[in-house]
Amino acid sequence: MEVLFKGVGAVQLPTVLSGLEVSEIPMEHAPGELRTLLTDEDWIGRKLYMIRSGGSTGYVVAIAAFFAEDHGEYYAPSSLYETAAL
């Protein structure tokens, strides 16, 4: 699975991701450390994405998220670059 976040304002993710669940959640559910890291202007036009992997939870603040699943090689170019350019 490939995931691309566009217009990222902040990333708080575990070092290793095994299995992945991405969901958009309301901004008021942002953890305290993200709230203090970003100004009100940083949130304008962005969404909060919660990423769950194994027993860990992380967050990405971004304008948009794109997803693709293929059977290409690890080093093959992602189809998401063309999608995100739109």
Image (cartoon, rainbow, N blue to C red):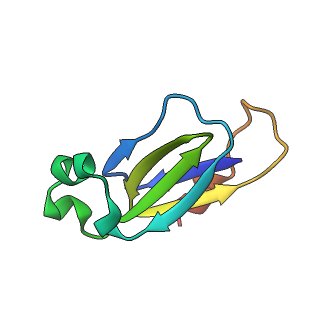
Residue 26 % position (x, y): 38, 71
Residue 63 is left or right of residue 35, and the answer is right
Residue 41 is left or right of residue 59, and the answer is left
State whether residue 49 is above or below residue 72. Answer: below
| Residue at the spot 32% in from the left edge and 67% down from the top edge | 27
| Residue at the spot 64% in from the left edge and 58% down from the top edge | 67
Residue 13 is left or right of residue 30, and the answer is right
Residue 53 % position (x, y): 60, 43
How many discs appear? 0
Farthest residue to the front: give it.
Answer: 55
Residue 83 % position (x, y): 61, 61
Q: Quadrant of residue 68?
A: bottom right
Q: State the residue in front, 13 or 69.
A: 13
Q: State the residue in front, 74 or 47.
A: 47
Residue 75 % position (x, y): 72, 30
State whether residue 12 is above or below residue 48. Answer: above
State whether residue 82 is above or below residue 57. Answer: below
* Viewer can see residue 28: yes
* Viewer can see residue 46: no
| Residue at the spot 16% in from the left edge and 49% down from the top edge | 36
